[in-house]
Structure formats: C-alpha cells, structure tokens
Image (tube, grey):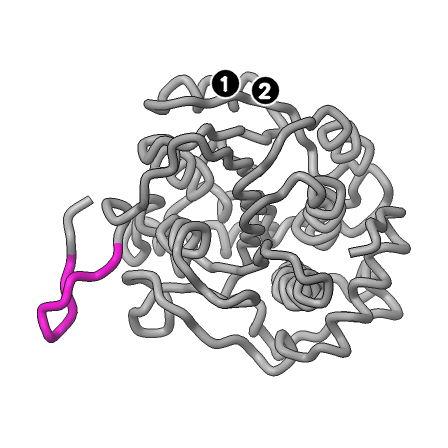
Amino acid sequence: MPETTDARGARKWNATHLPDLTGRTAVITGANSGIGLAAAEALARAGAHVVFAVRDLARGGAAAARVSGSTEVRRLDLADLDSVREFAAGWDRPVDLLINNAGVMMLPEQRTAQGFEMQFGTNHLGHFALTNLLLPYVTDRVVTVSSGAHRWGNPRIDFENVDLTGRYTPQRAYAQSKLANLLFTLELQRRLSEQGSAVRAVAAHPGYAATNLQSHAASPFARLAMRFGNRFLAQDDKAGALPTLYAATQDLPGASYVGPDGIGEMRGAPTLVGRSAAASDPETARRLWTLSEELTGVSTGC
C-alpha cells in the first residue's frame, strides 16, 4: 500500500507500519471477506498466525489459501450461541489478538438460532459470548468493529424490546447493534481495569469501505445506492481494514475508538475518533452487560 502524507508532509500510518508479529496469534471473526480478510492478510504478512473464525468452512478455506503466511480455519456461526460455545470449548492456547469483525447490515427482519433479532444477535450478542468465553486465553487485545452508524437517528438500546418487535427497521436495528459494540467495549475495559488486567478492549470503524456487507440490505433502493457508493465513493477493503489494524497493534488507551481521519470519518488514515454521548454512558454500558449475560447465559466474572 503506498504511503500518503498529510498537509505538512508527515507520513500517515498504513499497513507497512505494522510491527513484527511473529509468534503471535490473532483470531478474526468473518475473516473470509471484506475488511476481515484484508486485516488477516496484513497480520499474516507481519508474521502472526491468523485464525479464520468463519461460518462457511469452504469459503474460509478458500480465502485462507490466498493468504501468504500462517493460517487456520475454524467454524464459528455468531448467530448461533451453540456454535459460539463449541468454538470456545475447542480453544486451548493463548490468543494475543481477538478481532470481533464479523457482522450483518440492514437485513430484512430475521432471527438468530436462539430467537434474537439477527443484527443485535450477531453483531453484539455473538461477540459478547465469544469474547467472554475466550477471555481467559486473551493476552493482549480485544478489538471490536463498530460503525459510524452507531449515531444514526440518535439511537438508544431498547432495553424493554431489544429485538425491536413491532418497531423493527433495518437501519434502527443496525444502529442499535453498532451502539452495543461500543458500549460493550467501554464496559469490558472497565472490568479489565478493575481486575488489574493488562488486556485492553478497543473499538474501530472502517469508514465507508467497499465490501459485500452492504449487499444484503433489505431495501432494493438501499442496495442500489450502496452499489453506486461502493464503486464511486468508498475506499477499498484494505484501506477500510487500517483502523482495525491500528487498534490491534498500536499503543492505545483502553476503550479507545479508531476510525479514518478524513471528512466525516468516511475514509483516510487511522486515528482516534469520538463517539456519541449514548456510546459513552457507563451506566448504559453496565446495564447492557447485565442484559447480555442474561440473554446469552454467558458470564465469566470479568
């Protein structure tokens, strides 16, 4: 990836600045495509052993085969908590980097295997359960991929109706799930700090990156608009992966949020960015954690 510079001629951070990751293990959910695959390629190139945690083993294997470096593929369906538990039960070694990357976006109303609204269930609850089950093995960092969509419509977590039954829209559900990602990171870091753990929880968002995530939107108009945007406005998946890579490897404070430095945080080099007031509320973060424990049945005492 060619280097870019800012107005003063300073070099901006990109994947060529990754440290040597030899001997380190990174687990990436949804690593078979998009920014997950781009992050996997960069981390493997830097020497990490990258675990593709994917729903479709055939697609994951095909993607991993194109990566130059040390990889393995394991099945994980975040929309099925039994699959999450099976993945975690089969894990028996340190994880330096857990990257909660997989997600679904603006789907028609659907349910997970356990009956949760699909976007909240996959994007938040699946990763909540996975992180807590793997946390005894995590040695360095948990990176959770959120989105600028956490601000859409000034969303809140609907604690009385988290599945949005009777008031579902694809946009509302996606915004709630991405807000949940940031609140989860905030509360996870609080708990890690309280325990004196050296593990850090951080979040990132890719800006506007051209991936297949947008192709499943419920609205045909939205799919058409996003196809146009992907072709003419978006940055590519490698650029979209930079905030994730930065969050995973740079010396950042816990609960940091990384995104692109360009206008509207749509594209550019990774930097620390702000979040909405709703995503910064510690009481809401604690309440969401408690609800997530109840819904998933996963509690580690963290």
Residue extending farthest to the front is 196
Residue 120 sits in which quadrant? bottom right
Give how far across and how far down residue 266 sits, in percent.
Answer: 36, 65
Cβ–Cβ under 8 Å for marks 2 and 1: yes
Image-based side of 4 in relation to 93, left or right: left
Q: Residue at x 59, y 30 (%)?
A: 54
In the rendered image, the quadrant that contains the C terminus is: bottom right
Mark 2 to mark 1 CA distance (whole Å): 6 Å
Q: Please state the extent of the stretch shown in magenta in the rendering.
A: 4-13
User: Label 1 is placed on what type of residue?
Assistant: Gly
Q: Secondary structure at mark 1?
A: helix
| Pointer 1 residue | 61
Q: Residue at x 69, y 33 (%)?
A: 77
| Pointer 2 residue | 57
User: Label 2 is placed on what type of residue?
Assistant: Leu
Specify whether residue 42 is in view: yes
- Foreground: 167 or 63? 63
Specify whether residue 169 is in view: no
Image-based side of 122 in relation to 45, left or right: right
Magenta stretch: includes residue 264: no
Instruction: Name the main secondary structure of what is drawn in magenta.
Output: loop
Image-based side of 76 in relation to 42, left or right: right
- Foreground: 112 or 45? 45
In the rendered image, the quadrant that contains the N terminus is: top left
Image-based side of 28 in relation to 13, left or right: right
Q: Residue at x 86, y 45 (%)?
A: 115
Give how far across and how far down residue 181 sits, in percent.
Answer: 63, 60
